[in-house]
Amino acid sequence: MTHARIVLAVDKNGSAHSDVNAADFLHVSANTVYRVRQRFAEGGLEHALNHLHPQHLKPHTLNPAAEAHLIALACTHEEGQARLSLRLLADKMVELGYVPAVSHETIRKTLKKRPQAASEGTVGDSAD
């Protein structure tokens, strides 16, 4: 909404404001007004309003099915292990073919948002 207001505020056909005046009026920085104006000039209205570039949006490594397999795997115990490390879980996910590659940090973030998998101390990052 703010970007749309910026485009309207700096529109030369309407009530034209300078970048600084528009920034003061809309309570944003003059640099924000400048960047929106640049995107509008380079790519039109759609580009100015949708400022998230596709290259910054990457797909999730784990789809819902892979997350379910991860949770099931995290809730199991291997012989001789009190708990599974995040790195071991990542390696197992790749070994079992659920994902082509996954980092232990992705495993940690996924399990953090699924507290049932980490309950009862079954998952942790041991000193590897």
Image (cartoon, rainbow, N blue to C red):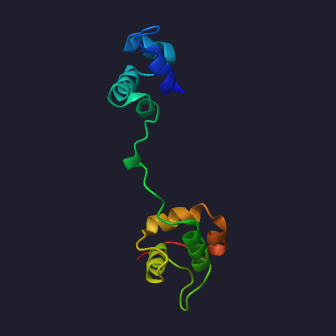
Residue at 45% from the left image edge and 20% from the top image edge: 7
Q: Quadrant of residue 113?
A: bottom right
User: Taking 37 as reference, is 80 above or below it?
Assistant: below
Residue at 40% from the left image edge and 47% from the top image edge: 54
Q: Nearer the viewer, residue 31 or 108?
A: 31
User: How far across and how far down the image is residue 87, in percent?
Assistant: 44, 75
In the image: residue 32, left or right of residue 122 = left
User: Taking 12 as reference, is 116 above or below it?
Assistant: below
Q: Quadrant of residue 48?
A: top left
User: Taking 29 as reference, is 61 above or below it?
Assistant: below
User: Taking 19 as reference, is 45 above or below it?
Assistant: below
Q: Nearer the viewer, residue 78 or 43?
A: 43
User: How far across and how far down the image is residue 70, in percent?
Assistant: 56, 74
Residue at 57% from the left image edge and 83% from the top image edge: 82
User: How far across and how far down the image is residue 73, in percent?
Assistant: 57, 79
Q: Quadrant of the N terminus?
A: top right
